[in-house]
Image (spheres, rainbow, N blue to C red):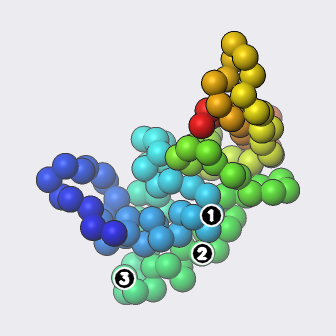
Amino acid sequence: MKIPRDSFETLIPLDQLAILLELEQEHHFDPLSSVEMEAYFVHQLADFHANACDLQHWLQPILQRSFRSASTLTRWIQNAEWQISKNAPIVFLGQIDFEPIDGLFHDRASVYVFLDPDSGERRTVLQIA
């Protein structure tokens, strides 16, 4: 995927971003979904000091530990909006899917539930197709 340099800014080096974008489907995250998510990856990538071709292998265990699900993986109906708390991704508990509901949702909708097991903080995300 080619990213136009003149219309896009990120603190993540573009060669590393390209690898993150390859991994996002497997782990259901978007490295640029929020300022907090971008900062999380900038912090993680600061510890990488090997050859660029080793980055994907180096990232896999970090992503598996960081993007945890209580049971099933997210099935985003729009862009991924994995939640961050205290500078790290929190656990995805599950999602509730809705068919269109007159007066509420004009199309399918999903509510995604996240939990920080350390603090008990809960977050929800609503997406409408």
Residue situated in front as seen by the camera: 72 or 104: 104
Sequence-earlier tag: 2 or 3: 3
- Badge 1, how many Cα within 10 Å: few under 14, some, many 20+? some
In the image, 18 versus 120, the foreground residue is 18
x, y percent for residue 8: 24, 50
Residue 76 x/y as whole percent? 63, 48
- Label 2 to label 3: alpha-carbon separation: 14 Å
In the picture of the structure, the residue carrying the numbered disc 1 is 27
Circle 3 crowding by C-alpha within 10 Å: few under 14, some 14–19, many from 20: few
Instruction: Give percent across and percent down for residue 47.
Output: 45, 69
- Amino acid type, label 3: Ala
Residue 45 rendering spot, x and y as whole percentages:
43, 66
Residue 60: numbered disc: 2
User: Given the current orientation, which residue lies at the most extreme left position?
Assistant: 6
At label 1, the amino acid type is His
Q: Distance of mark 1 from mark 3, alpha carbons?
A: 20 Å
